[in-house]
Image (tube, rainbow, N blue to C red):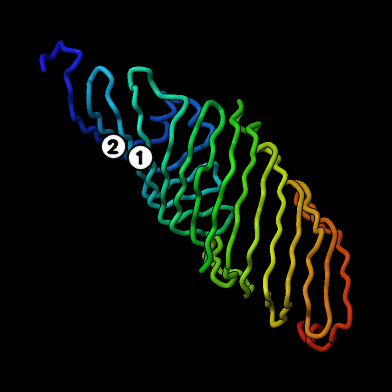
């Protein structure tokens, strides 16, 4: 069509590589709150009526860290913007995938997340990943506030058949545990000081040559103190349960241990 026509169309592809996160913060300042580190590549495809084009944006990074505690490898994030003339939309959907990620000191693989942002609320429409030989699924939402630390969480993470001996920590070591665990972690409250609850069960858990069957875990608290409401299992023909508080900063614990009909020889042999 004629260049001056409102009906003129186009199909344009823009590529940018080796971008510093500061580049994105320059036109969208909230990005700086996530303290991104690493190089990013951006692909934008502009298609349709140039007076109101549709834009498909893809962001890629081979190695990205954010907020100093999370590392993501081979990240790909994609979204569509239907009205570029209005600028960056407050509402959008974002599809995120990654080969692996280090979250809370634990390595997960095959990460896939579908996010939807409407106003200040980001909803996890679908989230999944592999951990050990088990699976993780996530759901819930985050309500954004300024500053970011005041943002409100309402998130749930469910784990199914997580093989503890297959879990790899940040330093490359594996957990000194064996067993298969299923459970749920719920985080609510502010980003700065979330309230966390954990409920989990396992047919057995073994550590340092000792084995507990029918293990139950119920823990709740915040970033200052975690309360063990129930940590129990059968040990041989007896049973063992632990309750109490664990203070995280500085680290200290106040625990009560209950044992019934325990065989002492297997327990004492750990100290020989």
**Around disc 1, counting alpha carbons within 10 Å, would you say few (fewer than 14), some (14 to 19), or many (20 or more)?**
some
Q: Is residue 75 visible?
A: yes
Name the image quarter holding the N terminus: top left
Name the image quarter holding the C terminus: bottom right
Q: Residue at x 78, y 50 (%)?
A: 225
Q: Residue 121 location, x and y as percent?
A: 56, 31
- Which residue is disc 2 drawn over? 43
Front position in the image: 51 or 64: 51
Mark 1 vs mark 2, CA separation in Å:
7 Å
Front position in the image: 34 or 194: 194
Instruction: Relative to 143, say whether 70 is above or below.
Output: below
Front position in the image: 169 or 6: 6
Q: Is residue 272 visible?
A: no
Which residue is the extreme one toward the left? 2
- Which residue is disc 1 drawn over? 59
Q: Is there CB contact under 8 Å for labels 1 and 2?
A: yes
Q: Is residue 258 left or right of residue 45?
A: right
Instruction: Relative to 167, say whether 259 is above or below.
Output: below
Q: Is residue 163 left or right of residue 111?
A: right
Q: Secondary structure at mark 2?
A: strand
Which residue is the extreme one toward the top? 4
Indicate the quadrant where residue 240 lies. bottom right
Q: Residue at x 87, y 69 (%)?
A: 257
């Amino acid at each position: 069509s004629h260049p001056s026509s409102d009906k003129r169309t186009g199909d344009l592809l823009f590529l940018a590589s080796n971008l510093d996160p500061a580049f994105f913060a320059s036109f969208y300042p909230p990005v700086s709150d996530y303290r991104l580190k690493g190089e990013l590549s951006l692909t934008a495809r502009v298609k349709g009526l140039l007076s109101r084009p549709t834009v498909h944006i893809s962001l890629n990074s081979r190695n990205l860290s954010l907020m100093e505690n999370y590392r993501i490898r081979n990240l790909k994030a994609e979204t569509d913007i239907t009205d570029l003339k209005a600028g960056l939309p407050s509402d959008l959907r974002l599809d995120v995938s990654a080969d692996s990620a280090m979250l809370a000191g634990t390595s997960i693989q095959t990460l896939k997340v579908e996010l939807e942002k409407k106003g200040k609320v980001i909803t996890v429409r679908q989230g999944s990943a592999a951990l050990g030989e088990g699976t993780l699924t996530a759901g819930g939402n985050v309500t954004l506030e300024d500053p970011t630390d005041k943002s409100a969480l309402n998130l749930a993470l469910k784990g199914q058949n997580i093989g503890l001996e297959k879990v790899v920590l940040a330093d490359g070591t594996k957990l000194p545990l064996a067993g298969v665990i299923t459970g749920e972690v719920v985080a609510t409250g502010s980003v700065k000081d979330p309230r966390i609850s954990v409920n989990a069960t396992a047919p057995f858990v073994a550590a340092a040559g000792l084995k507990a069957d029918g293990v139950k875990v119920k823990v709740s608290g915040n970033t200052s103190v975690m309360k063990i409401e129930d940590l129990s299992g059968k040990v041989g023909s007896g049973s063992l349960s632990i309750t109490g508080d664990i203070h995280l900063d500085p680290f200290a614990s106040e625990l009560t241990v209950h044992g019934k009909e325990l065989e002492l020889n297997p327990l004492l042999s750990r100290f020989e």
